[in-house]
Amino acid sequence: MWAYDGWGDLSFVGGEVRDPERNLPRALIIGTGAVVAIYLLVNAAYLYLLPIGQMAHSPLVAADAAQIILGRLGVGLVSLVVMVATFSTLLGSMLTAPRIFFAMADDGLFFKHVARVHPRFQTPWVAIVLTALLGIIYVSFRTFQQLADQFVVAIFPFYALAAAAVFTLRRRRPPAVLPRPVRVVGYPVVPALFVVATLYMLGNALWQDPLFTGLAFAVILAGIPVYYVWLRRVTRA
């Protein structure tokens, strides 16, 4: 699921996209379609080169497949590709994830200083530094596999809530109140299927690993009382 997660990051910077009615849907559809195609083609290559039994017991399937084609040189090339992919993913995350903290602070839902913009580069530099520090703390205590698994479990409840919010917004804010230049094809079936599929995935994760998945859910739920306490503090101020 993490391999398909990049589409969500685009929405974090939606307010900075030129001609969003045209470019956001195109970027989402083309980008997600490209990832799906690449992912399936790469896995098809693995299945062609390696027996299923060998794949099941291999921690580095890509390296094993490359070694069959190019020998030891292939293993080195795979390592290089992984490094480039990792840093490109990090670049995308650092361009998008800090916008969450920035938007929260700008809306009064986080410390106001986090919404500061650099006077020269016009970037949310405080939010970027905060995100980097949190990343350093996480990787200091957890392995990559643990972080990847918990990231998926932690982010997808919010994807489900965002899709479910479409139903509420359509009811509370009809087109006469809130114009909709972009519409979901197949509404309400498409967002409903997304919500159901996400809930199924999260339920499966809770079944497979109740301890760490339950811990991730507990941290998320702890944000609800914190939100209301913060809201009361802002209202009093």
Image (cartoon, rainbow, N blue to C red):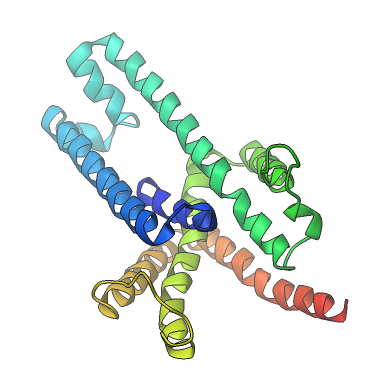
Residue shown at 41% from the left, 72% from the top = 163
Q: Which picture quadrant has residue 119?
A: top right
Name the residue nearer the viewer: 192 or 106.
106
Q: Quadrant of the C terminus?
A: bottom right
Name the residue nearer the viewer: 210 or 26.
26
- Residue 6 percent across, percent down from the top left: 41, 48
Q: Which picture quadrant has residue 133?
A: top right
Residue 11 drawn above or below residue 90: below
Residue 210 drawn above or below residue 72: below
Residue shown at 70% from the left, 67% from the top = 107
Name the residue nearer the viewer: 210 or 141.
141
Q: Is residue 26 left or right of residue 99?
A: left
- Residue 187 percent across, percent down from the top left: 28, 78
Q: Residue furthest left?
A: 48
Q: Residue furthest right?
A: 237
- Residue 111 percent across, percent down from the top left: 79, 60
